[in-house]
Image (tube, rainbow, N blue to C red):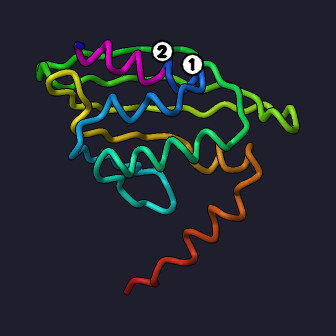
Amino acid sequence: MTPREVFERLVDGVTHGRWEELPALYAEDTFVTHPFSPAGEPLAGREALRRHFAAGAGLGVTMTARDVVVHETTDPEVIIGEFAYEGRVTATGRPFTVPNVFVLRVRDGLIVESRDYADHVAFAAATGRLGSLAGEVSAEPASG
């Protein structure tokens, strides 16, 4: 698959709740960062992605991707996707919109590196997990 096809399959899998299929889009030694996540932890390896997507399956949301724009770069392995997840929390009906920018490096049809810039705070607020997200941040050691 091309980087564009991998990106499209990733977003399609998330929006259609095919969580168990998503880890197969990543290389065994993939490295994914979420720079805007308050917890800030990277996901290293396909098994970490498997756990990440399993947690996504339990969120109880329906989503679509809106305003998808794909930027191809001069590096044939790198693609940038801009879009927003629009959805509803199934238990409450609460709507949400989460803007995203994904920078993917795809080699041999698999994501080897990704930087996923998403509004984690907006998503946590919509799904009623803002308190747990704050707990993840306060659990980190103080610096300085």
Q: Position of residue 24 (x, y in %)?
A: 34, 31
Count neighbours of disc 2 (C-alpha within 10 A) and say few if under 14, some if 14 to 19, many if 20 or more: some
Tag 1's secondary structure? strand
Q: Which residues are magenta?
A: 2-11
Q: Which residue is mark 2?
A: 68
Q: Is residue 78 left or right of residue 71?
A: left
Q: In front: 18, or 39?
A: 18
Q: Position of residue 67 (x, y in %)?
A: 53, 14
Q: In front: 96, or 27?
A: 27
Amino acid at pointer 2: Val
Residue 37 colored in magenta in the image: no
Distance, label 1 to label 2, CA atoms, is 7 Å
Count neighbours of disc 1 (C-alpha within 10 A) and say few if under 14, some if 14 to 19, many if 20 or more: some
132 above or below 55? below
Labels 1 and 2 touching (C-beta < 8 A): yes
Report the number of discs.
2
31 above or below 68? below
Residue 8 colored in magenta in the image: yes
Residue drawn at (28%, 49%), measured in percent from left and top? 45
Q: Is residue 98 left or right of residue 117?
A: right
Q: Quarter holding the C terminus?
A: bottom left
Q: Is residue 53 left or right of residue 59?
A: left
Q: Quadrant of residue 8?
A: top left
Q: Which residue is mark 1?
A: 65
Residue drawn at (58%, 47%), measured in percent from left and top? 55
Q: Quarter holding the N terminus?
A: top left
Foreground: disc 1 or disc 2: 1
Q: Position of residue 101 (x, y in %)?
A: 42, 31
Tag 2's secondary structure? strand
Residue drawn at (62%, 50%), measured in percent from left and top? 121
Prevailing secondary structure of the magenta residues: helix
